[in-house]
């Protein structure tokens, strides 16, 4: 077992190393330039489309809004609380700047993913719309690339049980046990019931729950973060100064902070940014393929908001809370660092806020990833796998809540990164199609922006 762990650890260092980060950023930058900065300039337009709700005559099972909420359910999670804190601990305040840069180019990646997902989606035997990287690889690149689609589906199908289920259940159980003394097994049993009840309703119920829960949890967390900033308002300019200063110059050791070179700020800022918003990994387009929309471009404009909301808004509140309170020099890391920051501003209350936020974020991540995993396995084995999968997925939460998951986390994290390789290859090869239909959309219907569909 030790040899297997060492081998996976070695592979993890490669797939989350410099080449992968360069590939993710490179494809994102290429798409951003190819789209002529459209994903940045059209952010207000994207929000207009988001609030339009269901599209009359559009094909799909869920509204564009609920498709985005399902996607955000999977991305707004431990990465927003623990991931941001880890990036600052390892890379210093400058890591936040590179996290923002990753989000800006990641919006183009997420846009292209959704455009391809809607354009190349199919209807399964039940008449449900299915899509994602495995479908746009198969239908967009042709038979010679089917093996790549199988690779993506296999990586996603296995990784989901770890990073999207057991690791999340373990985070919930740990947070509730430490702060409220709730036994791990009891949390596991409750999760089995809650997750199973939602999954039985399929994508419609997942999307309905996500559409209610995600906005509520995001607004609640942002409100708590805003309170921390208000209580430390005089420190906000200095926090931004630290971010921009150490994005391009080393951060010296101070207090419990060990110091960080510029390269560390870039590396950990990019890595944790990608981990949080999942731009380029190929997970989000699986949800957007089920959106009720008349065309791929409108859903792409909605999809790109996921990266904007996740990283540029939610992650920023975590980062600023850590910096304005001075907690970043405490020597803590991960969720404990974020908890320390909130506790400094809100003594006796901050730790509970983070524990509850972590639990809710992780629960919605389990729901979002259940859909990604289900569709990936359906691609490999057909619709007959759906009901057995839902039962196993629900029961896996009990396993995750009660066991130590060191190897499971390592393997899932590695496979999660491997998902990006087939997806990024497909996006690069399909980019001419993305550029073409985007131009046609705005040339024919987008000039006035009065009838975007």
Image (cartoon, rainbow, N blue to C red):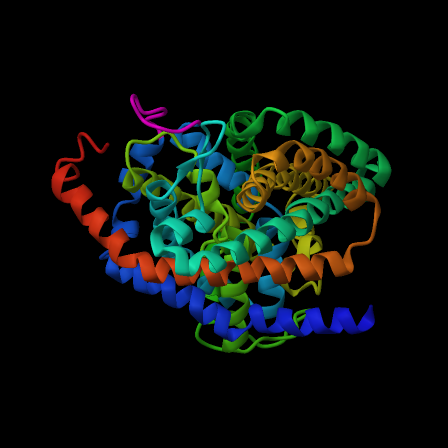
Which residue is depicted at the point 75% across and 32% down? 192
- Residue 96 place in picture, x, y as percent: 49, 61
Question: In the rendered view, does 387 fall on the left or right side of 48?
Answer: right
- Residue most extreme to the top: 56
Q: Point out residue 147 in the picture as x, y percentages from the top left corner.
A: 49, 59
The x and y percentages for residue 281 are 49, 55
Magenta span of residues:
51-61
In the shown orientation, is residue 413 left or right of residue 66? right
Query: Looking at this rendering, what residue extends furthest in the front direction?
Result: 143
Which quadrant of the figure has residue 323? bottom right
Please tell me whether residue 420 is drawn above or below residue 124 in the rendered image: below
Count of numbered circles in the view: 0
Relative height, residue 243 to residue 258 (above, below): above
**Most common secondary structure along the magenta stretch:** loop
Q: Nearer the viewer, residue 271 or 188?
A: 188
Compare residues 317 and 148 and report the one nearer the observer: 148
Q: Can you say which quadrant of the picture contains the N terminus?
A: bottom right
Seen at 59% across and 54% down, the residue is 154
Please name whichever residue, 313 or 133, is drawn nearer the observer in this view of the structure: 133
Q: Residue 143 is drawn in which quadrant?
A: bottom left
Q: Is residue 77 magenta?
A: no
Q: Residue at x 72, y 38 (%)?
A: 392
Q: Is residue 101 visible?
A: no
- Asked whether residue 21 is in view, the answer is yes
Relative to 230, say whether 408 is above or below. below
Q: Quadrant of the C terminus?
A: top left
């Amino acid at each position: 077992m030790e040899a297997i762990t060492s081998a996976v650890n070695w592979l993890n260092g490669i797939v989350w190393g410099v080449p992968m980060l360069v590939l993710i950023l490179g494809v994102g930058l290429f798409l951003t330039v190819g789209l002529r900065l459209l994903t940045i300039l059209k952010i207000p337009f994207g929000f207009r489309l988001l609030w339009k709700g269901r599209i009359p005559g559009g094909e799909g099972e869920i509204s564009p809004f609920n498709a985005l909420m399902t996607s955000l359910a999977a991305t707004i999670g431990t990465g927003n609380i623990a991931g941001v804190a880890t990036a600052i601990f390892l890379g210093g305040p400058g890591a936040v700047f590179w996290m923002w840069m990753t989000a800006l180019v990641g919006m183009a990646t997420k846009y292209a993913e959704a455009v391809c997902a809607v354009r190349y989606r199919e209807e399964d035997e039940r008449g449900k719309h299915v899509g994602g990287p495995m479908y746009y690889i198969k239908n967009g690149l042709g038979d010679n690339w089917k093996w790549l689609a199988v690779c993506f589906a296999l990586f996603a199908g296995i990784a989901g049980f770890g990073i999207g289920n057991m690791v999340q259940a373990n985070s919930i159980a740990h947070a509730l046990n430490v702060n409220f003394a709730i036994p791990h097994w009891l949390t596991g049993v409750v999760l089995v019931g809650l997750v199973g009840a939602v999954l039985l309703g399929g994508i419609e119920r997942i999307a309905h729950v996500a559409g209610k829960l995600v906005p509520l949890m995001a607004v609640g967390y942002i409100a708590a973060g805003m309170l921390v900033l208000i209580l430390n308002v005089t420190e906000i300019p200095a926090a931004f100064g630290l971010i921009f200063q150490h994005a391009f110059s080393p951060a010296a050791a101070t207090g419990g902070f060990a110091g960080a070179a510029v390269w560390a700020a870039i590396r950990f800022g990019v890595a944790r940014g990608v981990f949080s918003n999942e731009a380029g990994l190929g997970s989000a387009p699986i949800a957007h393929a089920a959106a009720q929309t008349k065309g791929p471009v409108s859903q792409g404009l909605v999809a790109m908001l996921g990266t904007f909301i996740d990283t540029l808004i939610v992650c920023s509140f975590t980062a600023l809370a850590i910096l304005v309170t001075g907690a970043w020099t405490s020597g803590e890391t991960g969720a404990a660092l974020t908890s320390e920051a909130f506790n400094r501003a809100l003594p006796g209350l901050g730790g509970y806020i983070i524990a509850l936020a972590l639990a809710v974020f992780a629960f919605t991540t389990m729901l979002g990833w259940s859909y990604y995993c289900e569709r990936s396995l359906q691609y490999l084995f057909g619709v007959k796998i759906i009901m057995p999968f839902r039962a196993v997925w629900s029961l896996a939460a009990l396993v995750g809540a009660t066991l130590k998951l060191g190897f499971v986390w390592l393997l899932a994290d590695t496979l999660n990164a491997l998902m990006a390789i087939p997806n990024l290859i497909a996006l690069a090869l399909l980019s001419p199609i993305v550029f073409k239909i985007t131009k046609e959309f705005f040339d024919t219907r987008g000039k006035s922006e009065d009838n975007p569909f």
